[in-house]
Amino acid sequence: MTVDSILKTVEKEAISTFSLLDGWFDEEQAVLNYRPQAEAWNAHEILVHAMLTCTNLMEEVEKGSACALECTDENEAFDWNQYTLLPKEVTEARDLPYYYAAPLPDAKVEDVFPIDNVRVSLRAQLLKCLEQLDKLQNGEGVRYKIFHGDFGIGDLDLYQNLYFLTQYGKWQLDQLRHNKREYLSLNA
């Protein structure tokens, strides 16, 4: 891989994933409120969780980016040919634990996190992601790593973290689609 291909891949995935998430805010209220099981989250709660997770991951990336840009180490010895954005077992995982986000409050989620505010926040997270890619254009993203112990994947550099954020969004999309399919099958 090259730095340019990494940047383009992450940018494309971020725009695609966040656009798909954004489309869910236009769903019927009944779809957003449908809860598949007593313990499962409805679409509104999934979108809130995606927002909280993205916010927390982006805060870590922004801190790491500042450190990476201050670092004077050069990337000349870095082997870009051996670089992968994420291990296959991570990109194909579907049962990773929900972490990073604070537990959802006991109060009604829609009262604490109005759906319009969640949408605005997710749009802001996309812009922050694209800003970080712009700042890390010269390979600086490999200079700083963030540890992900709960996922069992260890250290990820900043490019990998931004890509992970897009994959996490895709996992939320899978759950949203599942909820909608179930809702439609029960209300056909």
Image: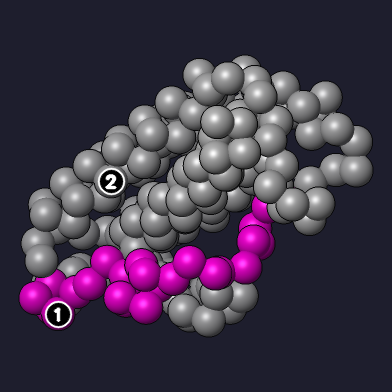
Q: Main secondary structure of the magenta part?
A: loop
Question: For this rendering, which residue is in front, 53 or 91?
Answer: 91
Helix, strand or loop at disc 1? helix
Question: Residue drawn 57% across and 44% down?
Answer: 182
Q: Quadrant of residue 92?
A: bottom left
Q: Mark 1 packing: few (<14 Cα in 10 Å), some, or many (20+)?
A: few
Query: Relative to residue 63, is residue 39 drawn left or right?
Result: right
The residue carrying mark 1 is 82
Q: Mark 2 packing: few (<14 Cα in 10 Å), some, or many (20+)?
A: some
Query: Relative to residue 37, is residue 133 drawn left or right?
Result: left
Image coords of residue 104 (percent x, y): 79, 46
**Placement of 95 over or under 32, stated as above or below:** below
Question: For this rendering, which residue is in front, 89 or 129?
Answer: 89
Q: Quadrant of residue 183?
A: top right
The residue carrying mark 2 is 13
Disc 1 marks a residue whose amino acid type is Gln
> Which comes sooner in the sequence, label 2 or label 1?
2
| Residue 73 part of the magenta segment | no
Residue 101 tag number: none
Disc number lying in front (2 or 1): 2
Residue 152 in view of the camera? yes
Give, as a single range, the part of the protein colored magenta.
Answer: 79-102
Query: Relative to residue 78, is residue 65 drawn left or right?
Result: right
| Residue 91 part of the magenta segment | yes
Disc 2 marks a residue whose amino acid type is Glu
In this view, which residue lies farthest toward the right?
106
Image coords of residue 14 (percent x, y): 33, 42
In this view, which residue lies farthest toward the front?
188
Name the quarter where the N terminus is drawn.
bottom left
Question: Residue drawn 30% across and 36% down?
Answer: 15
